[in-house]
Amino acid sequence: MGIDKHRRASKKGSSRDGGRFIALPFSVIDSPAFMQLSYAAKSLLLDIARQYASDNNGRLLATMKYLSKRGWTSSDVISRAKKELLDAKLIYETVKGHRPNRASWYAITWHSLDKITGYDAGAAERWPSARSGYLTVAPLRKNTLNPPKGVKKDMIEPSPGARDICDAPPAGAIRGIYQHSTTPSNGDHLDTPSIVVTEEFFSSNHMSSNVSFTKTFELHQFSNNSSITRISL
């Protein structure tokens, strides 16, 4: 029913659906002030502009009571979005609201301010500087990952230059100094001849008599007066 009503209301030969609409100039949509807005601020701007009826610019509302009917649920989100619009100079505050029941009034800055009784003192006088104020908002500078003077090439060698690698200390190789000889003082024990003994030798040196020997034993003498017996069975 609603769609048919709007279609019937459209003028003959018109290319759009009938009914009122928001006149939002390209100068607003393409401005840095608008493009830098958050999604919440852009939505709020449309809901404020939706109230404009050709003779009430300066008495547009952004209260929770009005916006809740249009799907807004957070007063904090509304407050932040409203501040963005004021900073972007897309809306202008004509009346400063206060408790308990005084709502703030606003005007969209791409339309002329209508003459309405009840503006704050000086609001109408300051309007000329606010009109089309969004056009004076400069675009934000994009953060760059490169330093202003450009990217420097990474150095893979020390600043004085690469040096030849030396395998030896600057003063030359150091000879090892050994305080003790690796050879026993009386010579290598392997150079000492073996003493061949027989079974009777071990028997006479307190060896058990119940052990039978059939082969020769060798007793090696070392420089530290100790001995090791190798037995071949």
Image: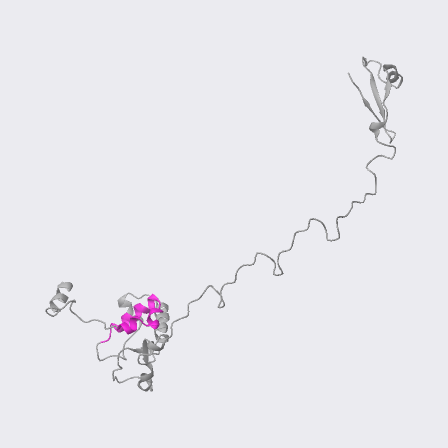
For the record, the magenta segment spans 25-52
Which quadrant holds residue 33? Answer: bottom left
Q: Is residue 46 magenta?
A: yes
Whether residue 6 is visible: yes
Q: Please state the total of marks drawn on the protein image.
A: 0
Q: Looking at the picture, does residue 139 appear above or below residue 200?
A: below
Query: Where does the image place residue 156, in percent across and percent down from the top left?
Result: 57, 56
Query: Where does the image place residue 191, in percent across and percent down from the top left?
Result: 84, 28
Name the foreground residue: 155 vs 163: 163
Query: Where does the image place residue 40, in percent across and percent down from the top left?
Result: 33, 67
Whether residue 66 is visible: no
Q: Is residue 165 magenta?
A: no
Q: Residue at x 35, y 75 (%)?
A: 86
Query: Where does the image place residue 51, in percent across and percent down from the top left?
Result: 24, 74
**Overall secondary structure of the magenta section:** helix
Left/right of residue 79 with respect to residue 24 in the rendered view: right
